[in-house]
Amino acid sequence: MEAVVFWVLAAGAVGTGAAVFVVDSMARATFSLLASFLCAGGELLLVGLRYLGVLVVLMMIMEMLVMAVFMVMYMMNPAGLMPMSMTHNRRGALAVAGGAFAALAAGILAVPWPERRGRPPRDPTVALGDAVMGSSMLVMMVIGVAILATMIATVVLATHRGRYDA
């Protein structure tokens, strides 16, 4: 059953990712990209990386919705729904994409894949955090809170009106 879900999510991620370049409006491209990222987040959840899967899902939902809101506010056409071409230099883009695909596919087939040693960690989230950050995990957590406080302070200072102004 897991294999079926894996392949459905993989096909969904690739299909909706390709749809980003096929649809004819920015809003549709945004929601196609969101669907692709949600499928990728589902893949992460499927392989047991709960923290990363939930993080990808939550981050991409918020990012794409903010992007859609800005499209509604700032685009000249209504809500980014007017037809437009989503590609530029079609021949060049196809050549670069085809070359990159061929190189990556050749790499997959040419590289000797290592055998697994040992068993998977008991908690993959802790193992991933330790592998990525090592002893700097506490520092990165503090920096994350500082960046969040900076973003909030920037928004507060950027508004001309106060909380009680009408």
Image (cartoon, rainbow, N blue to C red):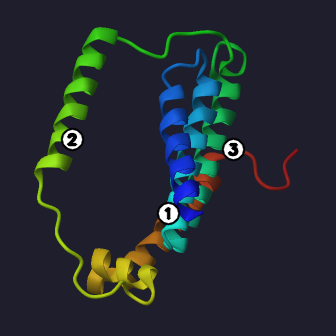
Q: Disc 3 versus disc 2: distance between alpha carbons? A: 51 Å
Q: At 58% across and 60% down in the image, what residue appears?
A: 153
Q: Position of residue 87 (x, y in %)?
A: 42, 15
Depth check, front residue: 81 or 111: 111
Q: Disc 1 versus disc 2: distance between alpha carbons? A: 21 Å
Q: Dot 3: what SS?
A: loop
Question: What's the amino acid at mark 1?
Answer: Leu
* Mark 3 neighbour density, 10 Å: few (under 14) some (14–19) many (20 or more): few
* Mark 2 neighbour density, 10 Å: few (under 14) some (14–19) many (20 or more): few
Q: Position of residue 46 (x, y in %)?
A: 54, 66
* Mark 1 neighbour density, 10 Å: few (under 14) some (14–19) many (20 or more): many
Residue 162 lies, with reference to residue 98, above or below; the image says below
Write down the residue under mark 3: 160
Left or right of 52, for residue 130:
left
Q: At 16% across and 69% down in the image, what residue appears?
A: 114
Q: Dot 1: what SS?
A: helix
The numbered mark at residue 44 is: 1
Depth check, front residue: 93 or 58: 93
Q: Position of residue 146 (x, y in %)?
A: 47, 71
Q: Residue 103 lies in what quarter of the image?
A: top left
Q: Quadrant of the C terminus?
A: top right
Residue 116 visible in image: yes
Q: Quadrant of the N terminus?
A: bottom right
Write down the residue under mark 2: 104
Left or right of 100, for residue 16:
right
Disc 1 + disc 2, Cβ < 8 Å: no
Residue 139 visible in image: no
N-terminal-most mark, 1 or 2: 1
Q: Dot 2: what SS?
A: helix
Q: At 58% across and 65% down in the image, what residue appears?
A: 54
